[in-house]
Amino acid sequence: MTDGITVIDLFSGCGGMTQGFKGASDYKAVMAVEWNLAAAATYAANFGESHMQWGDIAKIDDARIPEADVIIGGPPCQGFSNLGSREAGDPRNKLWREYIRFVQHAKPKIFVIENVDRFLASTEFQILLKETGAGGLLAGYELTYSLLLAADYGAPQRRKRTILFGSRIGGIPMPAATHGPTELLGTNQWRTVRDAISDLPRLPGTTELPAASTQFFGVTVPGSFRSSDLHLGRTPTAMSLERYDHVPPGGGRFDLPERLLPRCWRDKKSGTTDVMGRMHWDRPSLTIRTEFFKPEKGQYLHPQWDEHDPMNRVNRPITHWEAARLQTFPDDFLWCGSKIDIAKQIGNAVPPALAAAIANHLKPYLLGSATPDLPASPGPVASSNV
């Protein structure tokens, strides 16, 4: 990153938000914090090791926290997610307190929190709002928050996330959508799965990562791997292949004949409609999660399926490379870790396209060329199609 607006990235993962801010230019990373070794190594491979703090955020002393113009990050969200237990006492939900500690000591003009959609209904969010009041830990910051859809900002993916701005230079609105389901005045049409992956080989050449290793933080980790190294196939059973073959674009488990249904699906007559699902070529994908390589976990089958020609079908889940493309990581991004490590990094990341839209939106406020005048209030949901 070039010298300019200084940034701290907390709970950075592999660096999806940093990649987006880097793409917006004028931002300089001065610290990043990540506890997972493989993710921290991926961040270091792409953005440098010197400012990456690998380890427990709670063990970073106050004195080591630099001042910064912006803090970005998303405290772990499993306690808020529909996929988790949503236990109020989940210790992962308390890590946002560490985020606040960094805000107190770095004194950013703006901080950005990214989290799952259910964060807005959580106890932690209500406490966060109270802390901006008189005498609170975030007194002096005005909050603006909304659900944003990644597809509305250039990602070929219907990923819905909570975005929250905290500003001590005046209330800042949410960024206007740059894309929409149809091409309207001032916006482009949503990017599609076809836009993202149609140029990649239909048949992956291997099921394994290359034999490679490197050192970060004095520890040897697998990698670093190019995106083209991530075009990894699997070895499905004959029954799995037969299941895949029955699923058209937009279809799922309800398209399978009775004889191919496992008992758990046979006994469950409703819900989980996207599992064993196939993507559409000409729509954004659904949310890319950490187990996108398992069709039984979501709509992750390759979109190619010809109703009239069974030979013109691609009966496999998307590869790691395709998932990274759908998350808008560039092909020159480097990856560290095992196949499972990298899948988690891809699925947990903020799409760089969404992060870049946020970074470009905030830049004029940070540089003083735009004047914040929004009252401290929530923003609208960015898309009626969320």
Image (tube, rainbow, N blue to C red):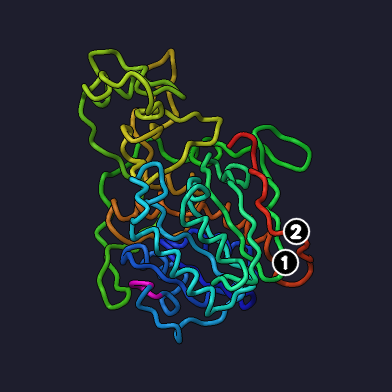
- Vertical order, 311 against 34 (above or below): above
Assess whether mark 1 and mark 2 are in contact (beta carbons under 8 angstroms). yes
Residues in magenta, as a range: 53-57
Relative to 168, 135 lies left or right: left
Pick the front one: 106 or 345: 106
x then y, percent, for residue 376:
69, 59
Question: Camera-side residue: 319 or 206?
Answer: 319
Q: Can residue 87 be seen in this view?
A: yes
> In this orientation, does residue 228 appear?
no
Instruction: Identify the residue at horizontal 73%, vertical 59% (top origin).
Output: 375
Residue in the foreground of this view, choosing between 5 and 2: 5
Whether residue 105 is in magenta: the answer is no
Q: Which numbered marker is on residue 374?
A: 2
**Residue 359 spot, x, y in % from top left:** 63, 61
- What kind of residue is marked 1? Gly
Q: Left or right: 292 with respect to 134? A: left
Residue 193 spot, x, y in % from top left:
51, 36
Helix, strand or loop at mark 1: loop
**Marker disc for residue 65:** none
Query: Residue 343: x, y in percent?
Result: 35, 50
Residue on which the image places disc 1: 170
Q: Residue furthest bottom?
A: 63
Q: How far apart are marks 2 and 1 (CA)?
A: 7 Å
Decide: few, some or many residues near mark 1? Use Cα within 10 Å; few <14, some 14-19, many ≥20.
Answer: many
Q: Please give the name of the residue rendered at 34% of the width and 22% of the height, measured from the top-left corner.
A: 253
- Image quarter where the N terminus lies is bottom right
* Quadrant where the C terminus is found in the figure: top right
